[in-house]
């Protein structure tokens, strides 16, 4: 097996240690719940932005309360919270009271980005909408994430991840044959909306720095999911079929999951040259150039036959042996891992795909790391998900709120 082009130490040899990341110095106010909005803000926090998560005073975000909890942590923390609220600070405000709104707007004066995912119109009702924030910070970048967007016939509908998967066509595609539609087992629409929102915020930052203009960014879960369906909507718009293929590929065969004697793999070929290699490996070298098998259309027409052929090859062999043989001849293959197997895989560990954050108690919380590897401004998990309101005094003090003023706000139930 070929060695990597560089090792980690070589890749990060010019890394700076004086910055939190490439967004060091950017301030983000997050007023968001559950996953899509918090995922957007989490990505910005991972890149080094100072993200202040604003939660309703006396009503913690649902992320703090969703089981199961990481019981080894001290205090115990929800898996949900640990994964999406890392690298942030947390304050509480009663935005339903005018004084809480005023505090939020004062904080917005020094912010670059606001991220919110309440239903369209709710933040405006609280006096914290785009126009309200824009009045105190003209070049603010205001990111609104919702199920269906800020306008359109369905804009006022409650919109959650499964709704977006259903409307986007993804749920219909995510099965085979005549089986019932099935959502993905993860919050994929939320993830995609958060990712597109963070990317749009970065583009808006670039525009602000170049032209001095802020703007309102409207991200819907439905739009983000449609845009991420890898061309299937384009096929549908052209009146072409959008087959439900499950684990197979529309333009490659064999390609599927296959059971070895000790576990599952995913393997397959797309290129004709790869088919020549695979057919030889399976002991059928004559099929490599046979006109009934040598081209992609020919193999796709014989998909079931070729799937059976590769399944028979794998069935009596150990998974590691099959993988070694395929890797040795340059074919794409991988173990199908459970999440528990994945976190202990040596490649995952070498890449630090999972990282730990140390709580004030000294307990470590292990969670998904920022995926980008940046040689000059590395990004990492700097701090664990904070408890409800733990940073309120620190953030308000930085914004110029005296101890007396903070005490008065606390006495009135604003913070």
Image (spheres, grey):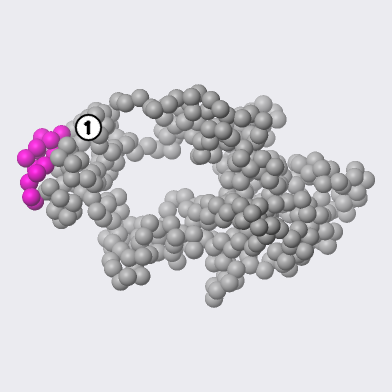
| In-image side of 134 versus 229 (left or right) | right
**At 50% from the left edge and 31% from the top edge, which residue is drawn?**
352
What quarter of the picture does the N terminus occupy? top left
Queried whether the magenta region covers residue 109, the answer comes back as no
| In-image side of 403 versus 66 (left or right) | right
Mark count? 1
Residue 175, above or below 167: above
User: Along the line of sight, which residue is nearer the eye, 384 or 29?
Assistant: 29
**At 76% from the left edge and 42% from the top edge, which residue is drawn?**
391
User: Along the line of sight, which residue is nearer the eye, 72 or 63?
Assistant: 63
- Give the SS element for disc 1: loop
Residue 22, above or below 58: above
**CA neighbours of label 1 inside 10 A, class few (<14), some (14 to 19), many (20+):** few
Q: Residue 285 is drawn in which quadrant?
A: top left
User: Along the line of sight, which residue is nearer the eye, 175 or 379?
Assistant: 379
| In-image side of 314 versus 224 (left or right) | left
Give the magenta part as a residue range.
Answer: 279-292
**At 63% from the left edge and 67% from the top edge, which residue is drawn?**
120
Residue 68: image location, x then y, percent:
56, 42
Can residue 33 be seen by looking at this rendering?
A: no
**At 88% from the left edge and 54% from the top edge, which residue is drawn?**
412
Q: Residue 176 is drawn in which quadrant?
A: bottom left
Residue 217: image location, x then y, percent:
61, 61
Residue 66: image location, x then y, percent:
59, 47
Residue 387: image location, x then y, percent:
70, 41
> Label 1, on which residue?
329
Query: Going by the picture, which residue comes out furthest to the front?
Result: 210
| In-image side of 339 versus 87 (left or right) | left
């Amino acid at each position: 097996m070929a060695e990597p082009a560089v090792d980690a130490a070589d890749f990060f040899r010019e890394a700076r240690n004086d910055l939190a990341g490439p967004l060091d110095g950017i301030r983000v106010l997050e007023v968001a719940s559950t996953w899509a909005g918090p995922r957007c803000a989490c990505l910005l926090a991972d890149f080094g932005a100072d993200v202040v998560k604003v939660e309703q005073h006396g009503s913690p975000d649902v992320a703090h309360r969703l089981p199961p909890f990481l019981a080894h942590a001290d205090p115990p923390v929800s898996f949900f919270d640990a994964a999406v609220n890392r690298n942030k600070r947390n304050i509480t405000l009663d935005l339903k009271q005018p004084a809480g709104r005023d505090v939020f707007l004062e904080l917005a004066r020094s912010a670059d980005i606001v991220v919110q995912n309440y239903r369209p119109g709710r933040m405006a009702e609280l006096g914290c909408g785009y126009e309200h924030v824009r009045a105190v910070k003209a070049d603010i970048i205001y990111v609104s994430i919702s199920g269906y967007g800020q306008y359109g016939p369905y804009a006022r509908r409650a919109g959650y991840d499964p709704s977006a998967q259903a409307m986007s066509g993804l749920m219909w595609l995510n099965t085979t044959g005549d089986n019932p539609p099935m959502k993905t087992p993860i919050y994929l629409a939320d993830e995609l909306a958060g990712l597109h929102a963070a990317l749009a915020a970065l583009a808006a930052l670039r525009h602000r720095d170049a032209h001095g203009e802020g703007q309102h960014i409207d991200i819907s879960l439905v739009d983000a999911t449609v845009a991420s369906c890898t061309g299937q909507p384009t096929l549908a718009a052209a009146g072409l079929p959008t087959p439900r293929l499950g684990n197979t590929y529309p333009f490659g065969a064999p390609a599927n999951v296959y059971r070895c004697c000790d576990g599952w793999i995913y393997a397959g070929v797309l290129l004709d040259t790869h088919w020549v290699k695979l057919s030889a490996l399976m002991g059928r070298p004559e099929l490599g150039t046979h006109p009934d098998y040598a081209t992609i259309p020919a193999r796709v027409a014989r998909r079931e036959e070729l799937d059976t052929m590769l399944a028979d090859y794998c069935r009596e062999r150990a998974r590691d042996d099959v993988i070694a043989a395929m890797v040795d001849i340059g074919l794409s293959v991988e173990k199908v891992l459970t999440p528990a197997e994945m976190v202990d895989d040596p490649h995952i560990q070498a890449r630090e795909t999972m990282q730990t954050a140390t709580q004030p108690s000294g307990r470590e919380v292990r969670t998904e790391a920022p995926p980008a590897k940046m040689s000059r401004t590395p990004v990492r998990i700097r701090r664990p998900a904070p408890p409800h309101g733990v940073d309120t005094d620190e953030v308000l003090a930085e914004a110029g709120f005296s101890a007396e003023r903070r005490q008065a706000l606390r006495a009135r139930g604003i913070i």
